[in-house]
Image: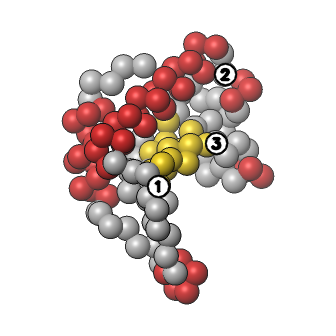
Amino acid sequence: MMNLYPYNNGHLMVSPYKHIPSISKLESEDLFDLISVTQKSTQILENIFNPGGFNIGMNIGKSGGAGFADHVHIHIVPRWNGDTNFMPVLSETKVMPEHMDSTYDKLLPLFKDIES
């Protein structure tokens, strides 16, 4: 799923269908599927956006910064050299080089056929 408040264009979250609060509670098959979809999603983002790298990680539990504390998910954030600027510091404003709808339109066709 796309992050409603992305850090960068193409910021995705991968989550299992099962409502599980932590990676430690996932069954082996669900854990494999979560990582497999993360791998496939990263490849799609590489092909579409050509980022210089990625931040891939999890925030588990409310104290760990999870926005959805009761549903484990992996963040995939494409990164480019120089992709940060002064706007969030000075005016609490995030500058995104592409509208979220455009990002969605680029990614949707490639995710329609994805299988875990």
Give me the C-alpha separation between circle 3 and circle 1: 16 Å
SS label for mark 1? strand
**Residue at x-position 32% and y-position 67%:** 97
**Residue at x-position 46% and y-position 73%:** 94
> Where is residue 103 shown, x and y percent of the image?
29, 52
Q: Which residue is mark 2?
A: 26
Q: Which residue is mark 1?
A: 79
Q: Quadrant of the C terminus?
A: top left
Q: Is residue 34 above or below residue 50?
A: above
> Where is residue 85 shown, x and y percent of the image?
49, 76
Give me the C-alpha separation between circle 3 and circle 2: 14 Å
Closer to viewer: mark 2 or mark 1: 1
SS label for mark 3? loop
The mark found on residue 51 in the picture is none
* Mark 3 nearby-residue class (10 Å; few <14, some 14–19, many ≥20): some
**Residue at x-position 77% and y-position 52%:** 63
Image quadrant assignment for residue 73: top right
> Where is residue 84 shown, x and y percent of the image?
50, 70
Closer to viewer: mark 3 or mark 1: 1
Q: Which residue is mark 3?
A: 58
Residue 6 in sight from this viewpoint: no
User: Which amino acid type is marked by label 1?
Assistant: Arg
**Mark positioned earlier in the residue sequence (3 or 2):** 2
Q: Quadrant of the N terminus?
A: top left
Position of residue 28 in the picture relative to residue 78 (left or right):
right
User: Which amino acid type is marked by label 3?
Assistant: Met
Q: Is residue 36 above or below residue 13?
A: above
Closer to viewer: mark 3 or mark 2: 3
Position of residue 58 in the picture relative to residue 87 (left or right):
right
